[in-house]
Amino acid sequence: MTALLSAHGLGKVYAGTGWRPGAPRPGLADVDLAIEEGECVALIGRSGSGKSTLARLLLGLERPSAGVVRFRGTGLAELDDAGRRAFRSAIQMVLQDPLSAVNPRHTVGRTVAEPLRHLTVLPAAERRARVYALLSLVGLDPSVIARLPSQLSGGQVQRVGLARGLATRPALVVLDEAISNLDAPLQIEILDRLAVLRRAQGTAFLLVTHDIRLARRFADRVVVLDAGRIVDASPCRAKLELGHPAARELVDAVLPAFPAGAS
Ligand SMILES: Nc1ncnc2c1ncn2[C@@H]1O[C@H](COP(=O)(O)OP(=O)(O)OP(=O)(O)O)[C@@H](O)[C@H]1O
Ligand SMILES: [Mg+2]
């Protein structure tokens, strides 16, 4: 089966970071990762391990220093105009810092409708109906539709970003700490709503997070990045089978929250 999105020997070296071959720490190195249609992969790792870098490379927002990203089998650099358009509509990212990703002068309604205007041919009335459905999906009251980002709470802005990311019914949504600023019950509510969406539409997710509990609740498997490399991986069965110290550190960090014997 051809993967929905895959990374092959992916590497990224940031200029000006003083890195030379042989030195320990590029932004990303030798990453192989395949995300299948409908699959949910959690990408975990400590701060600076390269999670956002990998997400940006997968989205084609940055060029890799090594390796290639393939969308349904075709390298991103080989996509023709129609392929690029299909890619942009199929793969969406929701960012860590949603305020930086929304135009402060655009209302919520306009922000959420933006990808629908650019990437679909939906008539205006259907666009509007879809915006309402998206707001309800992320648990926002329809009354926010005419508000500006400055008139919303941080958590509400984050959900606006999420609604926009889901607008084109993408095949894959990359959530880069996209629900981290929300309180725990809301995080779980949104992940549960996304799980419903996943079952209904076969949407795949790459969930970038520090929070191994959220990863386990939502994902089919967990992949661990450390210092720019994939160092461990486990299916999310009853018990995670992670042995690498970088993975243990993340697991142990939340252990007090697990009732004895529940992990
Ligand atoms: N544009 C850039 N220029 C130079 N170095 C960068 C750039 N972006 C990221 N880096 C470096 O690459 C490494 C990985 O950063 P990245 O943002 O991918 O980590 P992360 O795992 O997403 O961290 P966090 O959990 O804090 O978001 C870090 O050492 C970072 O300083
Ligand atoms: Mg990051």
Image (spheres, rainbow, N blue to C red):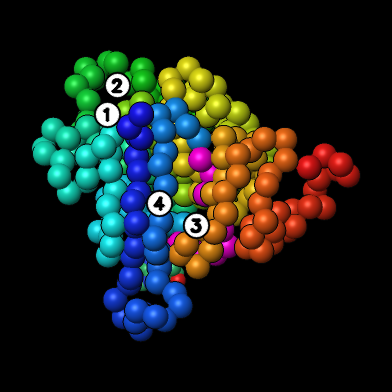
Q: Residue furthest right?
A: 260
Mark 4 vs mark 1: in front: 4
Estimate how packed mark 3 is, as few (under 14), some (14 to 19) or many (20 or more) residues with alpha carbons within 10 Å. Answer: many
> Which is in the foreground here, disc 2 or disc 4?
4
The amino acid marked with disc number 2 is: Arg
Quarter occupied by residue 9: bottom left
Question: Which residue lies at the image location 19% right of the left edge and 22% below the top edge?
Answer: 121
Magenta span contains residue 131: no
At 29% from the left and 48% from the top, the residue drawn is: 69
Which residue corresponds to mark 3? 230
Sequence order check: which comes first, mark 4 or mark 1?
4
Could you tell which of marks 1 and 2 lies nearer the N-terminus? 1
Q: Are marks 2 and 3 in contact (CB under 8 Å)?
A: no
Give the label on residue 127, or none: 2
Q: Quadrant of the N terminus?
A: top left
Q: Position of residue 159 (x, y in %)?
A: 49, 38
Earlier-in-chain disc, 3 versus 1? 1
Residue type at the position of mark 3: Ile
Whether residue 212 sits left or right of residue 196 in the image: it is right
Instruction: Evaluate if marks 3 and 4 touch, with contact meaning CB atoms under 8 Å apart.
Output: yes
Q: Nearer the viewer, residue 140 or 170?
A: 170
Identify the amino acid type marked 1: Leu
Residue 187: name its quadrant: top right
Q: Is label 4 within 8 A of ligand 1 (CB to nearest ligand atom)?
A: no
Give residue 116's mark: 1
The residue stretch that appears in magenta:
41-50
Quick check: marks 3 and 1 in contact, CB under 8 Å? Answer: no
Name the residue type under label 4.
Asp
CA distance separating discs 3 and 4: 8 Å
